[in-house]
Amino acid sequence: DPRTECIVDCNHAAVRIFGCGQRSEVLEQPLLSFSTRLQYDGTPSAEAAQALHQDSAQLQGTLAFEWRMCRPDGQEWDAVVHMQSLRIAGRKLYQFTLEDVSSTRATQRRVGELNAFLQAMLDQMPNAVFYKGGDSRLLGCNRRYLAHLSALDDFSSGIRALDRLTKPRRVEGKRVKGVNSFSPEDKALLHALQDPWVNLLGIRRGELLRVLNMLSPSA
């Protein structure tokens, strides 16, 4: 009920997900009594609920959001909430559907920690490293790879780098030309120039911005 902000009805699945034994423990209780003190961004739950209430004043359809919950025994859990406005006998009510996604969020946190660890390892490598998806889109790279691409900041540096890499050179008295005669750094730069996100006028910097937050800050 938006007037009292209390639960007026629920099913047995709601009783279980709230961690209660019977409906009477849920009915007439404010939803905040089943919430943690703070939400994910540090906002007090009461303040976040008030903002949500204001946003839902003109709600049409369904509003979905994540909410940090707490059971009576102190167990905290993560919920995806679907909120819908309805009217019964001239009375405006909100219907909430809850889904416990604690396991999913825990898995996402573990994957994020693993990715951060792997990125830190990549950033410590002396060679330029990048990886792509099946459609050849750049998915990530290490700091050394970005250092190579930073040489393409001005409009002519890409052309100069390609010209330097493709010029013949003398090795042990022989005139040679080809990728095998290049240093590892030159090879990495040549591969960078061949990447679909790079053109001869320079790197499309906007495409790299989305991977910068994957780099470890200590590298």
Image (cartoon, grey):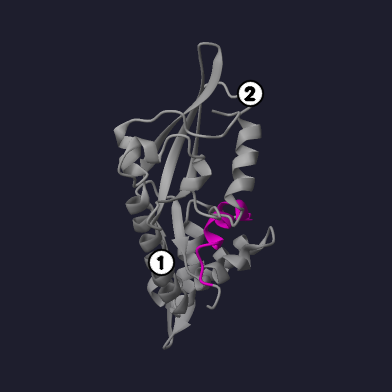
Do the residues bearing badges 1 and 2 touch, measured as CB atoms within 8 Å?
A: no
Mark 1 burial class by Cα count in 10 Å: few <14, some 14-19, many 20+: few
Q: Earlier in the sequence, mark 1 or mark 2?
A: 2
* Picture quarter with the N terminus: top right
The type of residue carrying mark 2 is Gln
Along the line of sight, the residue nearer the viewer: 119 or 168? 119
Q: Indicate the position of residue 140 as horizontal and vertical percent values.
A: 46, 60
Residue 98 placement, left or right of 168: left
Q: Nearer the viewer, residue 147 or 179?
A: 147
- In which quadrant of the rendered view does residue 37 lie? bottom right
Question: What percent of the width, then of the height, locates residue 83?
Answer: 49, 30
Assign a secondary structure to mark 1: helix
The residue that mark 2 highlights is 58
Q: Which residues are magenta?
A: 201-216
Seen at 48% across and 76% down, the residue is 185
Residue 20: name its quadrant: top left
Does any portion of residue 178 appear in the rendered image? no
Which label is found at residue 113? 1
Say which element carries label 2: loop
Q: Is residue 214 magenta?
A: yes
Question: Closest to the observer: 3 or 189?
Answer: 3
Q: Nearer the viewer, residue 130 or 55?
A: 55
